[in-house]
Image (cartoon, rainbow, N blue to C red):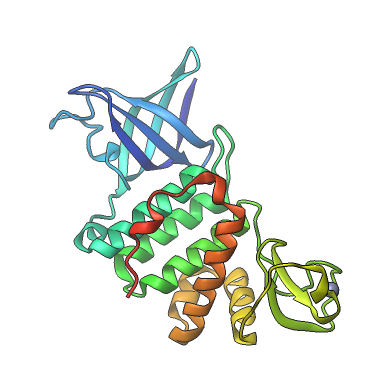
Amino acid sequence: MIIQTEAIVIRSTKYSDSDCILTLFTRKMGKLGVYSKNARLMKSPLMSGSQIFAYSNVTINTRDGKYRLSNADLISNFYKIAGSVEKTYLGYYMLELVEKLSMEDQSNIRLFQLLADSLYELEKNDNIILLKTVFELKLLDYSGFRPNASRCIVCGDSSSLGNYFAPQEGGRVCISCMGQVNIKYRYDSTTFRLIEYIQNNHISRVLEAKISRQIIEELSGLLDYYIKFHLSEIRLKTREYLILD
Ligand SMILES: [Zn+2]
């Protein structure tokens, strides 16, 4: 069988002096482990499409349940990301989150588009903390972990919402249900509005908006707790290297 799809290299591992094994995140089939023969050789037509971050139109051959890269037409290698240490770390963090939260042989088109859009934004946009925050919030949404900011997570009502967020339960909690959740944190109401704004708008639109640094930092802190509760078992290695100033 031949598969043709867009793909982003989320991991590239040396297999021999000439070959490598890629983890691709593809538009049509989600995550795939693909053998890339001779990709480490300078003259190989697969070389540029086998580098980490490479975004290409790929052709993959399948035989005996194994995937083999047979062609890669590069769309972008996002080379400008490598010009900044903090962008590089954020880029690796994005790739790791996608790798851990995506499924093999199962497409997640919204997540694929989010990763492609975010890498383009990472090249040109210097608002690293906002980009990280928007990426995390949308990724949680598209991976089945959407934080709920518009209704009470316990009773579902939206009429008497306070400013408390219960990360373990996955959302905001109303005044009458406050006693039912153990761990809750108070946030500015603008932070909840920002969550809804990010959830309802394209990443490029959010990045153009004027948002106060203080609110972005508050949301970033909220997501830290949220990720700690909901994604602790996936043990993110790149997260501790993020430099946000
Ligand atoms: Zn409630």
* x and y percentages locating residue 95 in the rendered image: 41, 49
Task: Answer with the quadrant where ligand 1 appears in the image.
Answer: bottom right
* x and y percentages locating residue 212 in the rendered image: 46, 87
Q: Is residue 15 visible?
A: yes
Picture quadrant of residue 60: top left
Where is 170 relative to 110, above or below? below
Q: Is residue 194 left or right of residue 8?
A: right
Closer to the camera in the image, 89 or 174: 174
Q: Is residue 211 visible?
A: no
Look at 56% across and 62% down and name the residue there: 138
| Residue situated furthest left in the rendering | 42
Look at 56% across and 65% down and name the residue there: 225
* x and y percentages locating residue 100 in the rendered image: 50, 43
Where is 177 relative to 34, above or below? below
Look at 54% across and 36% down and name the residue there: 29
Q: Is residue 161 left or right of residue 127?
A: right
State which quarter of the image contains the C terminus. bottom left
Where is 140 relative to 200, above or below? above
Q: Is residue 108 left or right of residue 8?
A: right
| Residue situated furthest top in the rendering | 64
Look at 48% across and 12% down and name the residue there: 64
